[in-house]
Image (spheres, rainbow, N blue to C red):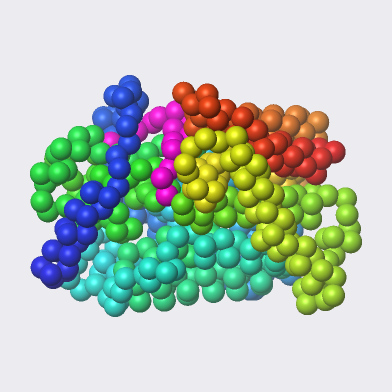
Amino acid sequence: MTQVQEGAWVEKAAVEVQVAPLDDRSRIDQWINLYRLPWLRPLIESRWPQLLVRILAVSGFVFTILVGLTGSLVGSHNFAIIFVWIAWWSVLKLGFIPLGGRAWCSICPIPMPGEWLQQGGLLKTTRKSLGLNLRWPKRLRGSWLQSGGFLLIGLFSAVTLTEPHITSWVLLGVFLLALGISMLFENRAFCTYLCPVGGFSAMYAQASPLEVRVLDKEVCAVHEVKTCYQACPWGLYPLGFKDNSACGLCMECLRACPNDNLAVNLRPFGADLGKQKHSSRLDMAFLALVMLGSVLVFSAVFTGPWGWLKSAAYEVGSRSWVEYASGYLGLNLVLLPGLFSLAVWIGKLFDRTASSLRQAMANQAQTLFPLGLMAWIAFTVSFAFPKLNLILAVVNDPFGWGWNWLGALNITQLNVNAGISAYIQVGLLIGGLFWSARVIQKQKAGNEANKFSSLPVMAFNLAFTCTMLWLLVG
């Protein structure tokens, strides 16, 4: 890295500190700083444990692509389908995101080769890095492209989730796209602006109990070099963090800080939600609505009793698929955004504040985050749990060629009681509804004048919850 580049980084970092308001949390000292635990600190400071997990993830990614292209054509007997859409999907939705926010991003195999080429090594940046290091176009920033990517997933989900070779080609295409983006643009541009899973994780990470934050802002203010900013593969400055949506938990800032001024906090769930936002950006609100619409459609297609709907979603290019795609896009692009906008507009009639409709939508979209997160977890319970037995089966015979690696051809079926599963789903969905109400309560705290303005949005959330309950448990 040249001195000019370093100077530009420092200048940009200083600007970000000035424009990004800091969190006002008087009780942060009561949270648990995991970085202070004697047994955990060495694991965070050393890059080797994370590197080994990353190499394992990349190896598994390549293996999954090969199995999808050469293994059994039957999805339920192919490692690629079961491991990606059952095992990984379940771990991501049930573990990584609700507990660790964007923790998956720290070990995701897709951007790793491009990042290693960018930094010129596996462990740390060298002067032999490759790539043009261009800035990402300003007009393409935000989560709009990630929303579009998730809509594409929804359009072709039935085929992708059942055809092993299509899953492999999709994974390979995403991998090559991420590699190409890394060679053109600086930092993790693909993860920040294009990856649908990255957008999904970024939004719901705000409900996570794990965060990286600065301990003393004054220490950062007088430190001129900004080593944490220079070390971050995302191009982030920790002092400017307002919530959990951007940080990929790679821990490079902690390793680079010479003043030991960063913490990995264990905090209450949803600590980022309920804050008044002054921005009128609607990209995150739109992403939240796309997540709601997608989980509704996925629940109807993959767990519903409508065979005609499954066939329509699967028969890509047919007239029935065009009708399915039109309905899916209409729900996500017109119906849900229209209903949510109407709910916020009606609420504005009771609101005496001077905020615009756009700003009100950006603020009240936070209520959709816990609602959507719990809906996706409930869907995962209904979709993945009944097929857990298939995971052991494909590990035993990943290509579907009659192998017996585990010596367990007669694998005992892992059955999840349907009644227990239904109770779990009901609890998750009702919990998500009450959590969204809690977020609204935090936003309206101390403002009795507009306490009724949130009722239309709560009615929207209630209607969504009832629809999910009907789709999942009848």
The one of 430 and 95 positioned closer to us in this rendering = 430
Question: Where in the figure is residue 350, as x and y percent of width and height?
Answer: 60, 35
The magenta region covers 263-279
Q: Quadrant of the N terminus?
A: bottom left
Q: Is residue 267 found inside the magenta-colored segment of the image?
A: yes
- Quadrant of the drawing holding the C terminus: top right
Residue 392 higher or lower than 133, as above or below? above
How far from the left and from the top, in percent, is residue 256?
Answer: 19, 49
At x 77%, y 42%, the residue is 467
> Quick check: can you spot residue 126?
yes
Q: Nearer the viewer, residue 67 or 261?
A: 261
Residue 140's x, y, as percent?
44, 68
Q: Is residue 470 highlighted in magenta? A: no
Q: Residue at x 89, y 61 (%)?
A: 308
Q: Is residue 212 above or below residue 29?
A: below
What secondary structure characterizes most of the magenta part?
loop
**Residue 388 visible in rendering:** no
Q: At which x and y percent is residue 152?
A: 64, 67
